Image (tube, grey):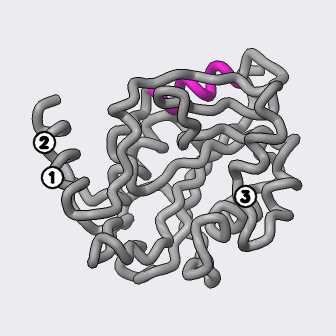
Protein backbone atom coordinates (compact mmCIF):
# COMPACT_ATOMS: atom_id res chain seq x y z
CA UNK A 1 0.00 0.00 0.00
CA UNK A 2 1.34 3.44 -0.90
CA UNK A 3 0.91 4.83 2.62
CA UNK A 4 3.19 2.31 4.28
CA UNK A 5 6.02 3.79 6.31
CA UNK A 6 9.39 2.37 5.34
CA UNK A 7 12.32 3.32 7.54
CA UNK A 8 16.03 2.94 6.95
CA UNK A 9 18.64 1.44 9.27
CA UNK A 10 22.25 2.13 8.33
CA UNK A 11 24.70 -0.08 10.23
CA UNK A 12 27.85 1.94 10.94
CA UNK A 13 29.10 0.75 14.32
CA UNK A 14 31.89 -1.73 13.56
CA UNK A 15 35.53 -1.76 14.60
CA UNK A 16 36.95 -1.80 11.02
CA UNK A 17 39.79 -3.93 12.38
CA UNK A 18 40.99 -5.19 8.98
CA UNK A 19 41.04 -1.70 7.48
CA UNK A 20 43.28 -0.29 10.22
CA UNK A 21 41.16 2.86 10.59
CA UNK A 22 37.48 3.62 10.98
CA UNK A 23 36.21 2.97 7.47
CA UNK A 24 32.99 4.90 8.09
CA UNK A 25 35.12 8.06 8.04
CA UNK A 26 37.10 7.21 4.89
CA UNK A 27 36.32 9.41 1.90
CA UNK A 28 35.24 7.75 -1.33
CA UNK A 29 34.17 9.91 -4.25
CA UNK A 30 34.30 13.08 -2.16
CA UNK A 31 32.13 11.84 0.73
CA UNK A 32 32.79 9.67 3.75
CA UNK A 33 31.34 6.17 3.58
CA UNK A 34 28.84 6.77 6.37
CA UNK A 35 27.61 10.04 4.88
CA UNK A 36 27.26 8.42 1.47
CA UNK A 37 25.18 5.55 2.92
CA UNK A 38 22.89 7.88 4.85
CA UNK A 39 22.41 10.15 1.83
CA UNK A 40 21.50 7.07 -0.22
CA UNK A 41 18.84 6.12 2.34
CA UNK A 42 17.45 9.66 2.42
CA UNK A 43 17.46 9.99 -1.38
CA UNK A 44 15.47 6.75 -1.59
CA UNK A 45 12.75 8.32 0.57
CA UNK A 46 13.24 6.18 3.67
CA UNK A 47 11.77 7.79 6.78
CA UNK A 48 13.00 7.87 9.43
CA UNK A 49 16.63 7.01 8.78
CA UNK A 50 18.38 5.53 11.82
CA UNK A 51 22.16 5.19 11.93
CA UNK A 52 23.52 2.61 14.34
CA UNK A 53 26.83 3.85 15.73
CA UNK A 54 29.35 2.34 18.14
CA UNK A 55 33.08 2.53 17.42
CA UNK A 56 34.18 6.20 17.58
CA UNK A 57 30.52 7.13 17.81
CA UNK A 58 31.11 10.84 18.40
CA UNK A 59 33.29 11.16 15.29
CA UNK A 60 30.67 9.34 13.22
CA UNK A 61 27.87 11.50 14.63
CA UNK A 62 29.87 14.63 13.78
CA UNK A 63 30.19 13.46 10.20
CA UNK A 64 26.40 13.25 9.90
CA UNK A 65 25.70 16.86 10.93
CA UNK A 66 23.11 18.49 8.71
CA UNK A 67 21.54 15.21 7.58
CA UNK A 68 18.00 14.28 8.59
CA UNK A 69 18.85 11.12 10.50
CA UNK A 70 18.84 9.81 14.06
CA UNK A 71 21.78 7.98 15.59
CA UNK A 72 21.28 4.91 17.77
CA UNK A 73 24.16 3.86 20.03
CA UNK A 74 24.93 0.16 20.05
CA UNK A 75 26.93 -0.41 23.24
CA UNK A 76 27.53 -4.03 22.17
CA UNK A 77 29.10 -3.17 18.81
CA UNK A 78 32.32 -5.07 19.55
CA UNK A 79 30.31 -8.31 19.60
CA UNK A 80 29.51 -8.10 15.90
CA UNK A 81 27.24 -6.64 13.25
CA UNK A 82 24.18 -8.58 14.35
CA UNK A 83 24.06 -6.56 17.57
CA UNK A 84 23.75 -3.45 15.40
CA UNK A 85 20.95 -4.99 13.33
CA UNK A 86 19.07 -5.80 16.51
CA UNK A 87 19.66 -2.30 17.95
CA UNK A 88 18.44 -0.65 14.77
CA UNK A 89 15.24 -2.70 14.58
CA UNK A 90 14.51 -2.19 18.29
CA UNK A 91 14.79 1.59 17.84
CA UNK A 92 12.23 1.84 15.03
CA UNK A 93 9.08 3.86 15.73
CA UNK A 94 5.99 1.77 16.49
CA UNK A 95 4.22 2.84 13.31
CA UNK A 96 6.96 1.53 11.01
CA UNK A 97 5.67 -0.95 8.42
CA UNK A 98 9.07 -2.05 7.09
CA UNK A 99 12.75 -1.18 7.32
CA UNK A 100 15.53 -1.32 4.76
CA UNK A 101 18.84 -2.33 6.32
CA UNK A 102 21.94 -0.91 4.61
CA UNK A 103 25.61 -1.31 5.44
CA UNK A 104 27.80 1.74 5.75
CA UNK A 105 30.59 0.05 3.78
CA UNK A 106 28.74 -0.76 0.54
CA UNK A 107 29.20 2.47 -1.48
CA UNK A 108 28.06 0.93 -4.78
CA UNK A 109 24.52 0.51 -3.41
CA UNK A 110 22.51 3.45 -4.70
CA UNK A 111 19.11 5.03 -4.06
CA UNK A 112 17.65 3.43 -7.20
CA UNK A 113 18.29 -0.03 -5.75
CA UNK A 114 16.70 0.89 -2.43
CA UNK A 115 13.65 2.43 -4.11
CA UNK A 116 13.19 -0.74 -6.17
CA UNK A 117 13.06 -2.85 -3.00
CA UNK A 118 10.48 -0.52 -1.45
CA UNK A 119 8.31 -0.47 -4.59
CA UNK A 120 8.37 -4.26 -4.86
CA UNK A 121 7.39 -4.59 -1.20
CA UNK A 122 4.51 -2.14 -1.50
CA UNK A 123 2.81 -4.30 -4.08
CA UNK A 124 3.19 -7.56 -2.18
CA UNK A 125 2.35 -9.33 1.11
CA UNK A 126 5.94 -10.66 1.29
CA UNK A 127 7.74 -10.38 4.65
CA UNK A 128 11.07 -9.62 2.94
CA UNK A 129 12.49 -7.98 -0.17
CA UNK A 130 16.08 -9.09 -0.60
CA UNK A 131 18.97 -8.17 -2.86
CA UNK A 132 21.01 -10.84 -4.60
CA UNK A 133 24.34 -10.41 -6.38
CA UNK A 134 25.18 -13.35 -8.59
CA UNK A 135 23.06 -15.48 -6.28
CA UNK A 136 24.58 -14.12 -3.05
CA UNK A 137 22.14 -12.51 -0.62
CA UNK A 138 23.41 -9.21 0.83
CA UNK A 139 22.07 -5.78 1.83
CA UNK A 140 20.12 -3.74 1.18
CA UNK A 141 17.41 -6.00 2.59
CA UNK A 142 13.88 -4.86 3.39
CA UNK A 143 12.30 -6.48 6.44
CA UNK A 144 8.53 -6.11 6.91
CA UNK A 145 7.01 -5.53 10.32
CA UNK A 146 5.93 -9.19 10.36
CA UNK A 147 9.54 -10.25 11.06
CA UNK A 148 10.58 -7.40 13.41
CA UNK A 149 9.95 -9.55 16.50
CA UNK A 150 12.28 -12.24 15.14
CA UNK A 151 15.02 -9.69 14.47
CA UNK A 152 14.66 -8.06 17.87
CA UNK A 153 14.92 -11.46 19.54
CA UNK A 154 18.21 -12.42 17.87
CA UNK A 155 20.96 -13.13 20.34
CA UNK A 156 24.41 -11.64 19.78
CA UNK A 157 25.70 -14.71 17.97
CA UNK A 158 22.64 -15.10 15.75
CA UNK A 159 22.45 -13.57 12.32
CA UNK A 160 19.88 -11.66 10.31
CA UNK A 161 20.54 -14.19 7.57
CA UNK A 162 18.73 -16.75 9.71
CA UNK A 163 15.55 -14.68 9.38
CA UNK A 164 16.13 -14.40 5.62
CA UNK A 165 16.63 -18.17 5.37
CA UNK A 166 13.49 -18.83 7.40
CA UNK A 167 11.33 -16.72 5.05
CA UNK A 168 13.23 -17.05 1.77
CA UNK A 169 10.41 -18.96 0.06
CA UNK A 170 8.05 -16.03 0.62
CA UNK A 171 10.57 -13.28 -0.16
CA UNK A 172 10.75 -10.98 -3.13
CA UNK A 173 14.19 -11.16 -4.73
CA UNK A 174 15.79 -8.41 -6.79
CA UNK A 175 18.98 -9.29 -8.65
CA UNK A 176 21.80 -6.77 -9.04
CA UNK A 177 25.12 -7.03 -10.90
CA UNK A 178 27.74 -9.03 -8.99
CA UNK A 179 30.19 -6.11 -9.08
CA UNK A 180 27.81 -3.99 -6.97
CA UNK A 181 28.51 -6.34 -4.06
CA UNK A 182 31.54 -4.52 -2.74
CA UNK A 183 32.06 -4.00 0.93
CA UNK A 184 35.23 -2.36 2.10
CA UNK A 185 37.20 -4.45 4.54
CA UNK A 186 40.83 -3.92 3.51
CA UNK A 187 42.86 -1.10 1.86
CA UNK A 188 42.92 -3.00 -1.47
CA UNK A 189 39.10 -2.94 -1.55
CA UNK A 190 39.21 0.82 -1.17
CA UNK A 191 41.33 1.41 -4.26
CA UNK A 192 39.13 -0.85 -6.36
CA UNK A 193 35.93 0.95 -5.33
CA UNK A 194 37.46 4.41 -5.80
CA UNK A 195 38.40 3.43 -9.34
CA UNK A 196 34.85 2.23 -10.08
CA UNK A 197 33.24 5.38 -8.69
CA UNK A 198 35.60 7.66 -10.57
CA UNK A 199 34.87 5.79 -13.80
CA UNK A 200 31.10 6.04 -13.31
Answer few, some or many: residues within 10 Å of disc 2's Cα (few below 14, many 20 plus, some between 14 and 19): few
Q: Which residues are magenta?
A: 113-121
Q: Nearer the viewer, residue 61 or 158?
A: 158
**Type of secondary structure dominating the magenta stretch:** helix
Is 88 magenta? The answer is no
Badge 1 is on which residue?
A: 191
Residue nearer the viewer, 151 or 37: 151
Describe residue 8's horizontal placement relative to residue 129 as left or right.
left
Circle nearer the N terminus (2, 3): 3
Q: Are marks 2 and 1 in contact (CB under 8 Å)?
A: yes
Q: Is residue 75 above or below residue 124?
A: below
Tell me if I can see residue 189 in this picture.
yes
**Helix, strand or loop for disc 2:** helix
Residue bearing the label numbered 2: 195
Q: Is 118 part of what is drawn in magenta?
A: yes
- Given residues 45 and 156, the one toward you in this image is 156
Q: Is residue 91 visible?
A: no
The answer to whether residue 107 is above or below residue 149 is above
Left or right relative to 121: residue 134:
left
Amino acid sequence: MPGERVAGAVLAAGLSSRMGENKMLIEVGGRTLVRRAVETALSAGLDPVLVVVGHESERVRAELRGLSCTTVLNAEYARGMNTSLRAGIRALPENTDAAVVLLGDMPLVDARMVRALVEAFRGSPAPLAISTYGGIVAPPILYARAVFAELRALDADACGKQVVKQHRAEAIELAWPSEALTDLDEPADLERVRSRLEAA
